[in-house]
Image (tube, helix red, strand yellow):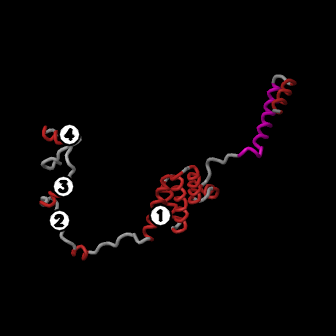
Amino acid sequence: MRWVSLLFSFGSRLSGDGMEWAAKSLFANLMAQLLNNPHIPKLEPFSRTRLERAIKEPPLIEKSENELADYCSTLEGDDSYSCWKAYFELKDLERESPKEDVEKLILQAGGVKSLIGCLHGISSMHKGRQNGFGLMAPMTVEKERDGPCPIPDGLPKSKEELEEEERARMPDSPYTRLLRTKGSFPAWYTPTPDHETD
């Protein structure tokens, strides 16, 4: 405000070109002082090199942990529990797996929400392997030969199978029985064709 009052006091003393010159120099001094003020944050240039970004920014894993922690702190209830569980699963995965694999997972996940789901899936797979539910061993040819012969498709059903299907059917409602006697099908029912069509 004192600069504005000084400007007006100079303006009252000077007239014409002198006033313009005084205003310009005063404005230039004012801008120089404002730009040199230590309380005003300075913006970083938009075109930083990769090296500058790598030095100033935290590593990808640490950055994603921070984002995950920030996101978890905004949630409540079961969602919050699931998010914090994923956070600690990421910490465990960071200890157990190579850094490159963890970074690939973070990059492939895309966002925080999908990262939570990926971390839950990976930790359940790790727990399954630890409990003995790993991948099954491939079957050998000898075991396949010892098994029973495969049943071909398209064979007519046996009498026992037909009776079992008849017992398993739900009883018809009165409305369905009425429609069957009339000969028309309900809108939701499509009869099976007698022959296959391509």
Secondary element under disc 1, as helix, strand or loop, is helix
Q: Work out whether residue 91 or residue 185 is closer to the camera in this orientation and state it.
A: 185
Looking at the rendered image, the quarter that the N terminus falls into is: top right
Q: What distance separates the C-alpha of mark 2 from that of mark 3?
A: 24 Å
Q: Amino acid at mark 4?
A: Pro
Residue 137 lies left or right of residue 88; in this view the side is: left
Where residue 20 is drawn, which disc sits there? none
Determine which residue is flagged by label 4. Answer: 186
Q: What distance separates the C-alpha of mark 3 from that of mark 1?
A: 45 Å
What residue range appears in magenta?
17-41
Q: What distance separates the C-alpha of mark 3 from that of mark 4?
A: 23 Å
Q: Amino acid at mark 3?
A: Arg
Q: Residues within 10 Å of mark 4 (few under 14, many from 20)?
A: few
Secondary element under disc 4, as helix, strand or loop, is loop
Q: Amino acid at mark 2?
A: Ile
User: What residue is at 58 percent from the left and 52 percent from the top?
Assistant: 73
The picture places residue 167, in percent across and down from the top left corner, at: 18, 55
Determine which residue is flagged by label 3. Answer: 167
Determine which residue is flagged by label 2. Answer: 151
Identify the mark nearer the N-term, 1 or 4: 1
Hey, which quadrant is residue 177 in on the image? top left
